[in-house]
Image: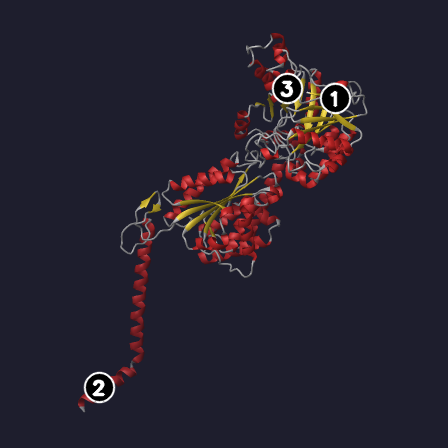
Amino acid sequence: MDTWSYFRTCLASIWLHRFYIYSAVALGISLWIVIQFTTTKTKKKGEKSSGNPPSSKGTEDKLVNGCATPQAEEVYVAGVKIFYGSQTGTAKRFAKALAEAVTSLNLPVEVINMGDYDPDDCLAEEATSRNICVFLVATYTDGQPTESAAWFCRWLEEAANDFRVGKTHLKGLRYAVFGLGNSVYVDHYNTVGRRMDRWLWMLGASRVMTRAEGDCNVAQSRHGSIEGDFEAWKAKFLTRLQALCRGEKKPCSGKCKKGKCRSPGKQSKESSDHERGASEHENTEAEELFETSSEEEADAEEAGGTNSIIDVEDLGNIMGHMKKAKREHELQEGDVGRRENPGRKEEEEEEKREMITPALRDALTKQGYKLIGSHSGVKLCRWTKVCSLSFSLLGNKTKLETYSVDAPGPRGLLQTHLLWDESHRCMEATPSLACANKCVFCWRHHTNPVGTEWRWKMDQPELILQEAMENHQNMIKQFRGVSGVKAARFEEALTVKHCALSLVGEPIMYPQINRFVRLLHQHSISSFLVTNAQFPEEIRSLEPVTQLYVSVDASTRESLRRIDRPLFKDFWQRFLDSLKALAEKEQRTVYRLTLVKAWNVDELKAYAELISLGKPDFIEVKGVTYCGESSASSLTMANVPWHEEVVGFVQDLAELLPDYEIACEHEHSNCLLLAHTKAVLPWSWRHTV
């Protein structure tokens, strides 16, 4: 009884003092939790400061070129897969160059053509593969993807906008996008790269770095060429890749508010809402500015990942960025200075860029150009180099591709003949290397700048003509001493009598073209000017030249868009207005038709209508010249018509034009000439050379 009484007394005492017991137990548990938390945090902090990832074995991971070796417990990057969508081979070439650079980091790499890849079956697997996916995509005609990337892009777009596909379908996929485009196509510059970047994000993928954009327009490219843009981006990507291999997160850019980074959760939420808002307002000014420059987007990503929204308190800064970007764009176009302060014209001229960039200079020099000043050039034409200097200088007869010579009267007597023994005295030059088209058959492979207006520094006509003649004479002098060259012919070749303004570029864009033509005539040099029919007002204001050519590369809006790839939005109206302006000129005029097989050879009636619109004195029809593989064109020898096909085309065209008849034919040039019958045709016109 005593034992039981004692035990019952103890239980009663415990029950009466249970609150103190509970408090003691709670205090002990709390102390244990605090100790464990402090120990873990201290350990992680020490590992982070040492730069080594945690290891259960307590050993440091060995790194090779910044990448974890197979012995490391955790592999952050298993490899790199490079997807490319290319039409002309540039993106493919970039993909191979990037693969070689990644291989040097001891990482597995795979180069994949998007046309050979099925995203429906394979892309989701990349979300768990720990690979980094790189997309090199080009923007082709009208902002569309290339043929090889068409299905890949279509699948991404449909998946991103399909409510049945989860928005985390590609969660875990890490990617980077490099777009290839041309900034002169303002409405769809790098649209494929931008859309792919957005679609991947909408499916839950994560960027490893901000999207980059390469620019084929050498005049506007940040690094002088698209190759320079790619090399700059590649260096940044490799640096980022090494950091990912070490398991590092992207460091703070230092642009956070008050120098402090916001919480990851808030950053992620902000970025997500911002991206979603941008995708829903693709055509708004704000989206255009963000997408075009990527600067604000880069800041947002550096501050907190791939997704963010804009706080109201930051709205002022964002609008400031937008206004700044808009001002810079207007200044680049030359509008703001002229509108606000006309007196700054001289200062603006000093600030304008030179048309010939170092990359452009190298490319054109390799093609045989002698560059003049900041925007002009001269070169020996094929007939001068191959025929004239091989035959005319030897005293034989040859033919110049320009058929007409001076004739009296406001429009001339239309008395045309082949320029026997004259092609060795012709200089081929241009006062403007820039152009407003990117024709698929351009034999200069689009190494020249493009634009819709003159925005570069300008040289004086006297300087251009003087240096053009000096360079031309120096090129002729290279044939001194060639066996068979007669001294009298060689001396004649040093005196320029004809000037063909028909090299790469659009000579009528040169603001001082009238002064330049007057200088030619003052030196007793005939002028043959070729324009691409995109500047009707300039054609109207052009003073009379010896012969005015207009390139009529197609007869329908769609075929002209595909062949010339013009920069102007209203290119078709400009084209028609240029032909109407030609009809108003009181001088000798010529249509130049370039036939591209499978592109524009089936448009006879449409051509006849355009001819009746411009009423040219001559119609020169020639087959396209294939100048080898080009990164700017998909033409092949299959697009070059046989001479018999050109003859058939001209004969059929002549039947639709009762006022014209075939004047002459030159088989070697794959060319025929139609002439208006309003003048008496001399017998020499009906002559086949």
The amino acid type of the residue labelled 2 equals Phe
Among the two numbered marks 2 and 1 on one chain, the one whose residue lies closer to the N terminus:
2
Q: Position of residue 305 (x, y in %)?
A: 46, 52
On-image quarter of the C terminus: top right
* Distance from the alpha carbon under mark 1 to that under mark 3: 27 Å
The amino acid type of the residue labelled 3 equals Met
* Few, some or many residues within 10 Å of mark 2 (<14, 14–19, 20+): few
Q: Does the residue at mark 3 contact the one at mark 2 (Cβ under 8 Å)?
A: no
Q: Which residue is labeled 2 in the image?
A: 7
The nearer-to-camera label among 2 and 1 is 1
The local secondary structure at tag 1 comes to loop
Q: Position of residue 65 (x, y in %)?
A: 35, 42
The amino acid type of the residue labelled 1 equals Arg
The local secondary structure at tag 3 comes to strand
Which residue is painted at 23% across and 86% down in the image? 9
Q: Which residue is labeled 1 in the image?
A: 686
Left or right: where 535 falls relative to 177: right
In this view of the protein, which residue sits in the foreground, 148 or 24?
148
Camera sees residue 381 = no
The nearer-to-camera label among 3 and 2 is 3
